[in-house]
Image: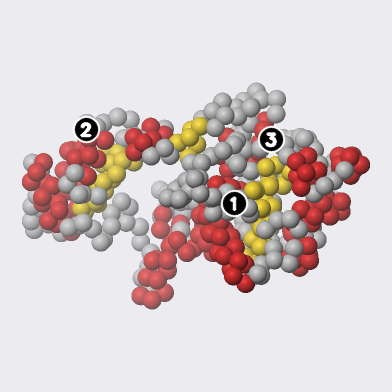
Amino acid sequence: MKKLPLEGIRVADLTMMWAGPFATRVLAEMGAEVIKIESPRAWDNIRTLIPLPDEAEPWNASWYFNDYSRDKKSLTLDLAQELGRQTFLKLAAKCDVVIENYRADVLDNLGLGLETLRAAKPDIILVSMAGYGKTGPERDQVGFGPIIEQMSGLASLTGYGDDGVPMKTGLSYGDPVAGMAAAAAVALALIQRRKTGEGAFIDLGQREVMSTLIGEAFVAASLRGEETTQHGNRDARSFAQGVYRCAGEEQWVAITFRTEGQWNDFAHHFGLEAGPGGLSASARLDEIDRWLSEWTAGKDPQWVLEQLAARAIPVGRVLDTVTVHEDRHLNERGFWKELPHPRMHAWKQPRSAWQLREARPEMKRHAPLFGEHNDEILRGLLGLGDAEMAELERLVIISGAPVNPGIG
């Protein structure tokens, strides 16, 4: 197998929670050596979010953390202490990329801003993923996924609940999207460095990344003055579209008819009424919804999918988090993998979505235990001796466990 695209690239990962760790997981999947850095006093909170029950070391047994940080190495380092800061700069000198998603002022307050990093490594690539970017009137605000989603404009498309309150999607959607954008930015910066010999600073505001996903709505508002309206499951560009219940608990299929001819062909084949003549567009869609709801009711959702797909009608099952793990297509493509873990039982995790023809990334290792690679990195990579290691331990700059860990 050929080399993965980022083999030989080393990343100092200062990120926490979701967006940043998702970005660095992608970089690790692509072959980069990712060193996840956490302070013994301020570790990645995702380590202790919903851990395995009754585990003696819950910070090493979190499903979330093990999903977002697999294939990485763990180094504990308290950057708030001067010796920790100096040790990090020694590491940065041996890295290609530093990536962080702190609040905008934190890296500078730690004495590790762009110019300091460039002094340590002139061609360093620095990615800052502050929620609102490094400049602007809101730069100092803390950005969490649900808040960023509301401020991006997305809620104007997802609509409002019965009480008139804007609704979020149910997922902190901005986090993984920003993570993918950061990974792509790193790849571009590495290409640029190969050509010019120069590093890069990437100011990636997560709110701005989220807003780019609703470009069509922005165009309609700015160029045509159109107000945002919610269409539910319908789409004005299609003849008919909806989501319909099938047999089983919460089993649904989504169906789109691009043209009236496509609907008529389907209706004729399956013995449904095809000609709602004289009806308004809205009334016609209501009738089609009624007919389709009666037709799909009691039918196996996979059977419905296969019948419509065979007629080139756009259709898909609405899979929940259980049935998606059982999906035949994903399983035949080898999408779900299990990794052994010393503190947890194995469970299905998604492999890399990037499957290159020349080199197929595969999950290699569970997420690292807290400080698991301290010796490998500090002694092996940086060449620290016994006395230096002892001093780092005495000051609790490094540790094999969090200080006063809490849960949640």
Residue at 63% from the left image edge and 31% from the top image edge? 61
Density class for disc 1 (Cα within 10 Å; few <14, some 14-19, many ≥20) is some
Label of residue 7 in the image: 1
At label 2, which amino acid type do we have? Lys
Mark 1 or 3: in front is 1
Residue at 52% from the left image edge and 62% from the top image edge? 209
At label 1, which amino acid type do we have? Glu
User: In terms of depth relative to the viewer, which is nearer, 166 or 234?
Assistant: 234
- Relative to 118, is 322 above or below? above
Task: Name the residue carrying label 2.
Answer: 299
Q: Earlier in the sequence, mark 2 or mark 3?
A: 2
At label 3, which amino acid type do we have? Leu
Q: Name the spot of residue 31 as percent of width and height, x first.
A: 57, 49
Q: Name the spot of residue 38 as percent of width and height, x first.
A: 73, 45
- Relative to 397, is 344 above or below? above
- For numbered disc 1, what is the local secondary structure? loop
Q: Name the spot of residue 350 as percent of width and height, x first.
A: 48, 40
Q: For this view, does 335 lie left or right of residue 133?
A: left
- For numbered disc 2, what is the local secondary structure? loop
User: In terms of depth relative to the viewer, which is nearer, 406 or 287?
Assistant: 406
Mark 2 or 1: in front is 1
Q: Are marks 2 and 3 in contact (CB under 8 Å)?
A: no
Q: For this view, does 291 lie left or right of residue 31?
A: left
Q: Are marks 1 and 3 in contact (CB under 8 Å)?
A: no
Density class for disc 2 (Cα within 10 Å; few <14, some 14-19, many ≥20) is some
Residue at 81% from the left image edge and 43% from the top image edge? 379
Label of residue 369 in the image: 3
